[in-house]
Amino acid sequence: MAIAGNLSNEQAIQAYKNAVIARTLDIKIISAQRQGIIGFHVPAQGQEMIQIAIAMMADNDDLIFAYYRDLALYIQRGVPLSLIFDQMLGNSNDLQKGRQMPDHFSFKEFNFSSVQSPVGSHLPLTVGAAYARRYTKKKGIVITTFGDGATSTSDFHAALHMASVFNLPVLFICENNGWAISVPTSKQTKAEIYKKGTAYGIPGKRVDGNDLIASLAGLQEAFDYVRAGKGPYLVEALTYRMGPHSTSDDPKKYRVDEITDGSENDPIRRLENLMLKMGVIDSSFIQSTKASAKEEVDKMLEERMSIPPPESSSIFDDVYEEPSWIQEEERRDSDGSD
Amino acid sequence: MYGLKPIAEVQFQDYIFPAFDQIVNNIAKMRYRTGGRFNVPLILRTPYGGGVRGGLYHSQSGESYFVHTAGLTVVTPSNPFDARGLLVSAYKKNDPVIFLEPKRLYRSIKAEVPDDMFEVDIGKAAKLKEGDDLSIITYGSMVPTVMTTVEKNNVNAEVIDLRTLLPMDVDAIVQAAKKTGRVIVVHEAPRTLGVGAEISALIAERAIDSLLAPILRVTGYDIPFPYTHEELYLPGEKRIMSAVNRVLAY
Ligand SMILES: Cc1ncc(C[n+]2csc(CCOP(=O)(O)OP(=O)(O)O)c2C)c(N)n1
Ligand SMILES: [Mg+2]
C-alpha cells in the first residue's frame, strides 16, 4: 500500500514515529534545560517533516552538513538517542568529548559533518567537500541545511557561486521557519529565497516543508538533478518555528502569533490527520506511539545522565594531532583544577 | 562616514570574524591610506569572554586580533561606570573603536552610574587597589576575579585595570613595575601573543632593572574554549594565587 507516489504505508508510519520521537525529545530537552541538566537547546519543533523528508531521500553515501536545528534529521537517519543525549550533556561518552555546545553535533559514522554556530559559515565547506567527492570519485552528493537568516550571509552567496561555477553536486536546502531569532523573513529578504540561485545558474524550488508528501515530491526533483551531475540545486522549504529561537530566547518580546502543539498546521498533526483519514493508523496507534516515545526518551536521559564528564585533562587534546609544548606545559600546570 | 556616527553591535565577538576583512583592511586603514582625508568614526560594541556555558563560539576572548591592528582603538570596561564613561569617550573619537564588553559581568555585577555624560579617558588605566608587595595588571572580565582573590587572601598587591588595550597605558605599566618589582598579568584570553606578552615586553624594555621576580602570566589556555569543562579554562583564585606565591617567594 502506498500513501502517495512512492511512499509506502510502512515508510509513512516510520516517518511519523520518528517525528514523534523528535518532538518528544525536544520537549524533554527543554525541561532538562530548565532543571539545569542540559545547558542549552535550539528546539526543532515545527520543522520535523522537512528534516525527515531529507533523511528519507538521502543515501547513506550522501554527506550532510546540517545546521543546529535539525534534531529530526538525525533521528530519521538512524542516530541513536543515546548519542544525541551524550552530546547534549557533554559527557565522557560524547563523541566530541564535551567540546561543543548542545545541538552542535558531529556524527561521522552517519555521514554528518560538524555543526558550528556562526550562521552560514558551513556553506562554503559543502563546496569543498563536493569538490573532493568528485575529484576522488567517491559516491554520493553533499546536502546542506540552513535557515532563512543564513541566506543573508556572504558565505551563502560565495557557496552558491562556487558550487555553480564548478558544477558541483551540492543540494542546498533552506529551512525557512519565518524567523532569524527576532527578525521576520520579511525583514530578512526582499526576494524569494528559492530564486536566489537564479543569478548563479542554480535552479530553485519552494516546497511545503510542513507536509511530508509535498516535501518528498519537491525534494525528488532536486535530488534527481544533483545526482545526475547537473550541478547544485536550491530548495526552500517553508516551515515554521513553533517555539523560541533557543532556551535563551523569549519570543513574547517580538512575536504574537503562535502555532502550538495540536494546531492543524503542526506538521506532525498534518501527517497524523492524513494517515487517520486514509485508515493507515487509528487513534490508539497515535496514543501508543506517543506513550512509547515518551518512555524511551525519559529512560534514555535517565541512563545517560549518570555518565561522568570527560577527563578534565582532555581539554588539551585534539588542538593538534600531537600537542605542542604549549599545550603540554599548560596541561601539566593545570593539574585538572582552576 | 559621510555624516554618520555608527554604533554597531555584533551579538558575540566570535561572530566578528566574518567581518574581519572589513575591520582590518577598510575600517582600520581608511585614515592612513587616504592621507588623513577620510576617517571611520565607528564604535563596534561586542560581548566577549566565557563563563556563560557558550562553548567554542560564544566564549572567545579575541582582543589580540584587534590589538595587533594599528588604526583601531580597543577598550574593555570592567564595571558599569567605566562602560558608560568609555562609551562616551569612544563616541567623541573620530577613529574606530572596538568596544569589548565582558559578557560574564553583564549579570554578575551591578552599580549605580551617574546620569551626566561623564567620560573615562581612553588610554588611561585605573588603579583599583593600592599595595606594596606586587602589582597585578588585568582588565575586563578578570578584574572582579582578581579583586576578590587578593581581598580574600589578604594579598598586599596593587591592582591595575588597563581599561584600554590599544593604546595601552604604558606609564601605568612601567610605574607599577618600578614600584613593586613584581608583576603578574591576568587575562582570560590565551597566553600566546596575548596582551600579557606585550605588557611583559614593555616592562622588560623599560623597567628591567627594577624587577625582583620574573613577570608571570595567568591566562586562558592555548586551546579552543571548551564546553563541559569551561570552569577549568577560566583563570580563577587557585591559578592567580599560585602565581602570587611564586612571585613573592622568588
Ligand atoms: C555570524 C553570526 N551572527 C550572529 C549569530 C547569532 N545567531 C544565532 S542563530 C541566528 C539566527 C539565524 O536564523 P536562521 O538562519 O533563519 O536559522 P533559525 O535559527 O531560524 O533556524 C543568529 C543571528 C550567529 N550565530 N552567527
Ligand atoms: Mg529562520
Image: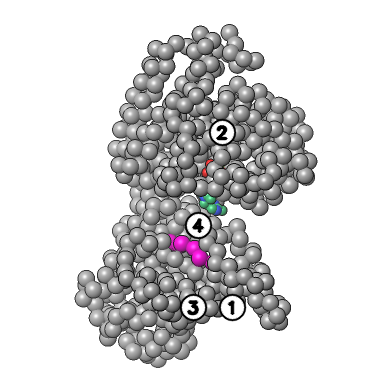
* Residue type, numbered disc 2: Thr
Q: Is residue A175 left or right of residue A304?
A: right
* Residue located beneath label 4 in the image: B11
Q: Quadrant of the N terminus of chain A?
A: top right
In the rendered structure, are the residues bearing label 4 and label 1 in contact, judged by CB atoms less than 8 Å apart? Answer: no
Q: Is residue B222 visible?
A: no
* Residue located beneath label 2 in the image: A239
Dot label at residue B94: 1
Q: CA distance from mark 4 to mark 3?
A: 22 Å
Q: Nearer the viewer, residue A63 or B23?
A: B23
Q: CA distance from mark 2 to mark 3?
A: 46 Å
What kind of element bears circle 2? loop
Of labels 4 and 1, earlier in sequence is 4
In the rendered structure, are the residues bearing label 1 and label 2 in contact, judged by CB atoms less than 8 Å apart? Answer: no
Q: Chain of mark 3?
A: B
* Residue located beneath label 3 in the image: B89
Of labels 4 and 3, earlier in sequence is 4
* Residue type, numbered disc 1: Asn
What kind of element bears circle 4? loop
Q: Chain of mark 1?
A: B
Residue segment shown in magenta: B44-49
User: As displayed, is residue A144 above or below residue B199?
Assistant: above
Query: Which residue is the extreme one toward the bottom?
Result: B209
Instruction: Name the residue located 53 percent from the left edge and 16 percent from the top edge.
Output: A274
Instruction: Name the residue located 40 percent from the left edge and 31 percent from the top edge.
Output: A25
Q: Position of residue B187 (x, y in %)?
A: 40, 69
Q: Chain of mark 2?
A: A
Q: Nearer the viewer, residue B222 or B199?
A: B199
* Residue type, numbered disc 3: Ser
User: As displayed, is residue B178 above or below residue A306?
Assistant: below
